[in-house]
Image (cartoon, helix red, strand yellow):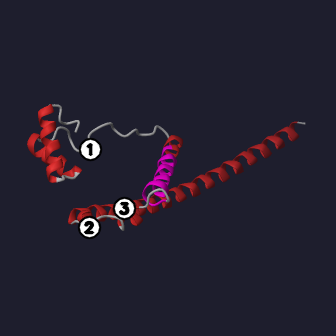
Amino acid sequence: MAALSDAKDRAHFQTKVIAEGLTYKQLYDAIKQKFGVRRKPGAGRPMKVPRDVTKALIHLNAQADNFIRCNERVWFGEEFDIIESLADLPSSVLSDQFKEQLTEAAEMCEKLARLAEANSHKLRQALSQVERRIAAQAKFEQQAQEDEEMSCAAAS
């Protein structure tokens, strides 16, 4: 509750959370209703934009690797599995709000899948371009070397 710097306000909302069993979103909405929005949604540190393609690829690979590790260990892995944990949830947790969270998570995964597939296709096209450029450069260099050898042979 970093937004609540006053101890009296903090105590009020702590009591409210305990008494009403508020979720984070409900608490956030209650604070927002009382005090208004303290900062713009999504505000914060701006995303770091890479300066070149190599750095962008390094960052993309690192973020993808992190996502995969979280997927395998934190969300759907041996250490914790969301689906397996659903069976252990008490009925009191199964609410419309919980269904909304589950729906939102499924929709985000679907969005990730669409983006990953589209970006994979773009990267494969880029790879094809790079391969053509490398082949063309090799052909050019070979032709230049042959021309130089011919010039040397003619000069001799």
Identify residue for label 3: 111
Residue 91: which numbered mark, if any?
2
Circle 3: is it few (<14), some (14-19), or many (20+) Cα within 10 Å? Answer: few
Horizontal side of residue 125 vs 116, given as left or right: right
Question: Where residue 95 sits: x, y (%)?
Answer: 22, 65
Task: Please tell me whether the stretch drawn in magenta is mainly helix, strand or loop.
Answer: helix
Q: Are marks 1 and 3 in contact (CB under 8 Å)?
A: no
The residues bearing labels 1 and 3 have C-alpha atoms spaced at a distance of: 19 Å
Region of the chain picked out in magenta, as a range: 59-77
Question: Where residue 45 sits: x, y (%)?
Answer: 32, 36
In-front residue for pair 116/104: 104
Amino acid type at image mark 3:
Lys
Q: Residue furthest left?
A: 34
Horizontal side of residue 95 vs 35, given as left or right: right
Residue 42: which numbered mark, if any?
1
Q: How many numbered callouts?
A: 3
Q: Residue at x 40, y 59 (%)?
A: 112
Q: Secondary structure at mark 3?
A: helix
Q: Is residue 46 above or below residue 131?
A: above
Amino acid type at image mark 1:
Gly
Q: Nearer the viewer, mark 2 or mark 3?
A: 2
Q: Is residue 5 above or below residue 134?
A: above
Which of pointers 1 and 2 lies earlier in the amino acid sequence?
1
Quadrant occupied by the C terminus: top right
Q: Are marks 2 and 3 in contact (CB under 8 Å)?
A: no
Horizontal side of residue 119 vs 148, given as left or right: left
Horizontal side of residue 26 vs 101, given as left or right: left
Queried whether the magenta region covers residue 60, the answer comes back as: yes
Amino acid type at image mark 2:
Ser
